[in-house]
Each structure stands twice: as C-alpha cells, then as structure tokens.
Amino acid sequence: MIPKIVRRGLPLLPLAALAGCNTVVMNPTGDIAKQQADLITISVVLMLIIIVPVMILTVLFAWRYRKGANAKYTPDWDHSTKLELVIWGAPLLIIIVLGLITWVSTHKLDPYRPLDRIDEHRPIPASTKPLEVQVVALDWKWLFIYPEQGIASVNELVTPVDVPVRFKITSSTVMNTFYIPTLAGMIYAMPGMETTLNAVLNKPGDYQGLSANFSGEGFSHMKFGYKGVSAGEFDAWVQKMKANPGVLNRADYLALEKPSVREPVRYYGQVEPALFNRVLNRCVAEGSVCMNQQMADDHKRNQVAAAIKALPKAAAAQVANAEVCETPAAGNPNNPVKK
C-alpha cells in the first residue's frame, strides 16, 4: 500500500526529473540562438491555441455524453455553420501566421547571411570585420584553424564576445553536424563541401559544442569545449598559442585525421598556409590533385570540345589534325610529336 503523502507527490515526479535538464537551448547566450529560441516559443504557443481547447473538449464531451447522462438527444443534427467556421478558420489562421513567421525568419536567420546586429539593442558597425574560424570535422574530434592568426586547436574553440564570427566548415570523411547550442543552430559539415555559419556570442563563459549527426563508433564523445572571452583575453590567448612550438602541416594533419576517440585538447602555434583549402579539396596527401583544379581543367577541356564541335566540319578536322602532343620526342625535349 502506497502511503497517501507519496501518492499525492507522484504527479510531481516528472517535474523533478526535468529539473536536472540543461535548458541551454531555450536560454542561450548568443543572439542567433536566442532568436531561434523565440521562434520555438512562438510556434508552441500558436499550436497550443488549437491543442489546449481540443484536449479540454475531449474530456468535456466524454463527460457530457456519458452513459446515463441527461444530455439533449438530437439524432437529426448534422451541420453547424458556426462550428465549421471555428474548426477550419482557427487552424487556417494559425497556419498563415506560422507561414509568415517562417518566411521572415528563414531569410533573417540564414546561416550564410552576414550579421547585422550584436544583439537586439546593438547594431554591428559597418567597418566591423568578423573573426574567421575554419572548422574541420574529423573522426572523432574537431579541428579549429584561425587563418588570420595562423594558429589551430583540437577540441577547443575560443572566440571573443560581442564579435561576429564566421565559421567555414567542412569534414574530412563523413557527414557531421557542427552544433553549439548556446551560440546558434546546427549546420552540416560535409566532405568536399564548405558550409558557412555566422554567429555572435554575447556573454563570456565556458560552454560545449558537439556533433549532432551520428558518424560512427566515437560519435558520442565527439564534443569540444567552447570558451567565450573578452577581446583582451582573446588577444592574450592568441599570443600564448603563437608561442606554442606545435606546427600543423600536411603530414601532421594526415596523422591527426586517423580515427581516434576522446582525443585530448591540442594546440598548434603555426599552421601551414592553405591547409583548410587542401582539406576541402581533398588534396592534403602529396601528389594528389585538388578537386577545384581538376574541375577547372575538366571545364576548360569541355569548353574547347564545345568550341571545336561548333566549328564547320572541315575547320574542326583541321584543328584536330593540327593539335600538337605535349610529350617530347625521345632524346629531344624540344621536338614535340605531331599527331
């Protein structure tokens, strides 16, 4: 037999369980994430306008028309214009409002769109230059490259507060999702592709980022620390990083790229120039051809082929016969072989 006082407290158990939840999604410290949280609140309230009356009426109808009740019996009733207007009109109005909000917010909160404000009270000055951070999703860790500062870190991200940050994101192997709940919404990291996220943090502190897309064995530990610091503290951190002897070159990256779980935080005081572009274009290894160069060469060949095809047949044949092979004749590098 459950004691009476315990029975009275049972309905409060779900609230007690929710008390331990992290509500950072609804209480973020970044302006973009805050606007997204407001969208969630508005959407839920609008939907509750329909859900709550339906739940109340379900109980009311069950009670009113229960067996043995003295409710009015109207077997010939089949239509009510007022009731039809309520049933169809209210959801239609809510859908219209939600559609307008979605249209506006989709364009306003586009992750590729440069920021126009620090927060709801402070616009961004026109001369402000965002901090660029290049992000590479590895198995199963995160690499952050600061191209302007020439430094890099593994599993730790540091940015100054109230400074726009532009993330350039890619992946080394499989698709992942770059997500810092307190900063902005999640965006995919894909191999051979670059995605962009513009965001700003408004409050210093220690936060956490993670991958929100399953990517294999070490996915559950693919998290990183995120620190929001003042501008002065960020400058001091950069100088400290530059004093680190670690160098991230192509060979070191290939070693880092190998799958590992619970990778410790690493720092690099120097980064090989254009390393991120090589990762993006899949040409870090020596001797490999970059995708952008290969596509440019293919495009050029297609243009030449299309131009030859557009010529009259006689002229096209003459051009083809006059084509010179780039391979030199044996023993004479200055004597090309004519086809």
Image (cartoon, rainbow, N blue to C red):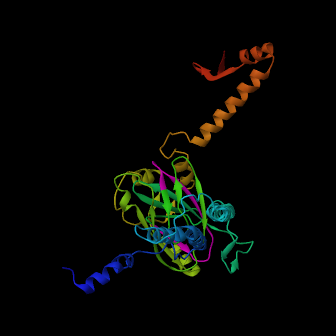
Pick the residue in front: 335 or 81. Answer: 81
Pick the residue in front: 240 or 45. Answer: 45
220 in relation to 30, above or below = above
36 in relation to 251, above or below = below
Q: Is residue 145 magenta?
A: no
Please tell me which residue is depicted at 45% across the width and 55% down the height of the picture.
213
Report if residue 320 is visible in the image: yes
How would you classify the magenta stretch by its main secondary structure?
Answer: strand
Pick the residue in front: 255 or 309. Answer: 309
Q: Residue furthest left?
A: 1
Pick the residue in front: 100 or 279. Answer: 100
227 in relation to 151, above or below = below
Report if residue 249 is visible in the image: no
Please tell me which residue is depicted at 57% across the width and 51% down the height of the picture.
277
Residue 292 at what x, y percent from top left? Answer: 61, 42
Q: Is residue 164 magenta?
A: yes
* Quadrant (top left, top right, bottom left, bottom right) of the N terminus: bottom left
In the picture, measured across the screen, residue 174 lies left or right of residue 318, that is: left
Residue 89 at what x, y percent from top left? Answer: 66, 63
Numbered disc total = 0
In the picture, measured across the screen, residue 107 lies left or right of residue 74, that is: right
Residue 29 at what x, y percent from top left? Answer: 54, 77
Residue 332 at what x, y percent from top left? Answer: 61, 21
133 in relation to 239, above or below = above
* Quadrant (top left, top right, bottom left, bottom right) of the C terminus: top right
Instruction: Please provide the residue range marked out in magenta.
Output: 156-176
Quarter of image, res 267: bottom left
